[in-house]
Amino acid sequence: MSLILICRLLGVTALVVQVAISKEAPEVTVSVWPPGSNIYPGECMLLRCSVVSGSRSVWTYQWFRNKPHMALTPNPRHLASHDSYSITGVTREDGGSYWCQVERRGSNSTTVLLSDPARLTVSELAPPSLTVTPSSRQIFRGERLTVQCPVSGTNSSGWALRQLSQDFGLRTADFQTGQCTPLEGAVSADVPDACIFPTVYSGNSGLYWCERAGGRSNAVNITVSYGTIIMKTPVHSVPEGEQVVLYCQYWKGNHSKTTFFKDGVEVHTSLSPDRVVEMTIDNVTKEDEGFYKCASHGRKMESPASWLSVGSNSTSANGTPISNHGSRKWIILSCCLVGLLFLIPLIVWVVHHYRYQICRTRNCWPISKEELPTVELPKTKQDVTEVQWDLSWMEMSNLLDKQLYPIS
Ligand SMILES: *[C@@H]1O[C@H](CO)[C@@H](O)[C@H](O)[C@H]1NC(C)=O
Ligand SMILES: *[C@@H]1O[C@H](CO)[C@@H](O)[C@H](O)[C@H]1NC(C)=O
Ligand SMILES: *[C@@H]1O[C@H](CO)[C@@H](O)[C@H](O)[C@H]1NC(C)=O
């Protein structure tokens, strides 16, 4: 009885100690959106820092890259804002480790916590491609938007469309159930695996990607604008050498003069008085990559900046297999090879051993090749193991026959 009591007391003590510890030590973690450590060139992604602590407290956030406790080198595509860190138009250089550090100032003490690193690898392979119509990172409220998961040959491809809204709510439309309701869109009757948003509003802003067992598509960041002017750049990387058209669109009215800027520098002026003004770049090169914005005459209205991503021309992403599949094939293949490498000597050894044991008990036939004068070696030079293998197999079957049918 007393033993049980002691055990119980110990248990309760352990529990109390555990609770005390977990209260004392808040935990800080970095989550990656879309989930996974592989990121794809040209896409958008988000890191989010969260603190789990017993008490409600106000934390300040700081982000580190490649090395903890080192100030970030400014990068226009990287935006650190409180608990989130977003990357627009991922490039090779964006791979590496990212940390989040949180700080809380109490009346007596300051608590500083550093997360484990989030390690990101930029994939070499193009992911299956998400299709957005119109292909623009910015869209006016009330416009129509279609987001479609990668199209495959069969009709049921198993994709689910996910949206991480700007307030970090995660919503999933599972096409197998034939619904996009959580995303407040309608399933398209004619386009497979697509959600249609007939009139977009702020809730449609956010990060979109498709997911299924074993992989995901690239992720795209869409912003619904409530302003008076937007800059439309394609959601995907434009292959080098192609032509790209950028659109500056006014909410209403025609405007006599529109100026385009790249990374803050004026690059083009259009005098065509339209609600939608174009700027065409023939033969796009890596130098054209950057943040574009446009402004009305005298910069009375100015659009938010929008990223133009230029990729190498080899990868047309549509329909290419998920990177996982490729590497998985290699893993399986190398496993088979390694297995064979181990298996062959093992079999040889087992056969050898077995024969040796039988021969030891029965004293029947010679063990080594040298003691086998009667066996004729074939003219073509055969491998030693091969000869031994043939022999022992024959001997073994002989022996088994004898043992199974001792009368014969
Ligand atoms: C998406 O775009 C908006 C507006 O430019 C920006 O505030 C946000 O950080 C972006 N999010 C991601 C995940 O890139
Ligand atoms: C601050 O420190 C004093 C003296 O060490 C202690 O009595 C008090 O409880 C502390 N207050 C808090 C909020 O930790
Ligand atoms: C595109 O630009 C590259 C580099 O400037 C050049 O070598 C190539 O000939 C151009 N192609 C066309 C079709 O203009």
Image (tube, rainbow, N blue to C red):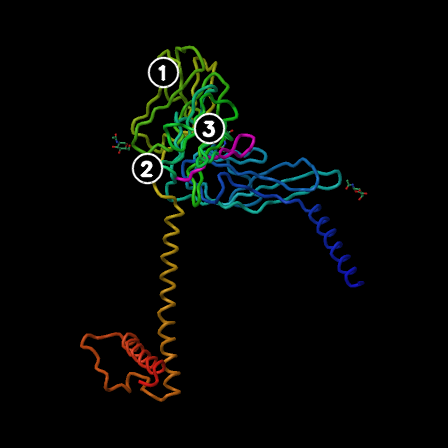
**SS for tag 2?**
loop
Q: Amino acid at mark 2?
A: Ser
**Answer yes or no: do the residues labelled 2 and 1 have beta carbons within 8 Å?**
no
Q: Amino acid at mark 1?
A: Ser
Q: Is residue 394 above or below residue 112?
A: below
Q: Residue furthest right?
A: 2
Residue 228 percent coordinates (x, y): 48, 16
Q: Which residue is mark 1?
A: 270
Q: Residues within 10 Å of mark 3 (few under 14, many from 20)?
A: many
- Which quarter holds ligand 2? top right
* Any part of residue 59 in sight: yes
- Residue at image position (36%, 20%) is 268
Q: Which residue is mark 2?
A: 316
In magenta segment, residue 77: no
Q: Residues within 10 Å of mark 2 (few under 14, many from 20)?
A: some
Q: Which residue is mark 3?
A: 222
Q: Residues within 10 Å of mark 1 (few under 14, many from 20)?
A: some
Q: Is residue 144 above or below residue 370?
A: above
Which of the marked residues, 1 or 3, is nearer the chain's N terminus?
A: 3
Q: Is mark 3 within 8 Å of ligand 1?
A: yes
Q: Is mark 1 within 8 Å of ligand 3?
A: no
From the viewer's perspective, is the residue at label 2 or at label 1 nearer?
A: 2
- Residue at image position (50%, 18%) is 227
**SS for tag 1?**
strand
Which of the marked residues, 2 or 3, is nearer the chain's N terminus?
A: 3
- The magenta span reads 157-172
Q: Amino acid at mark 3?
A: Ile
**SS for tag 3?**
strand
Q: Which mark is residue 216?
A: none
- Residue at image position (30%, 26%) is 282
Residue 104 percent coordinates (x, y): 68, 39
**Image quadrant assignment for residue 108:** top right
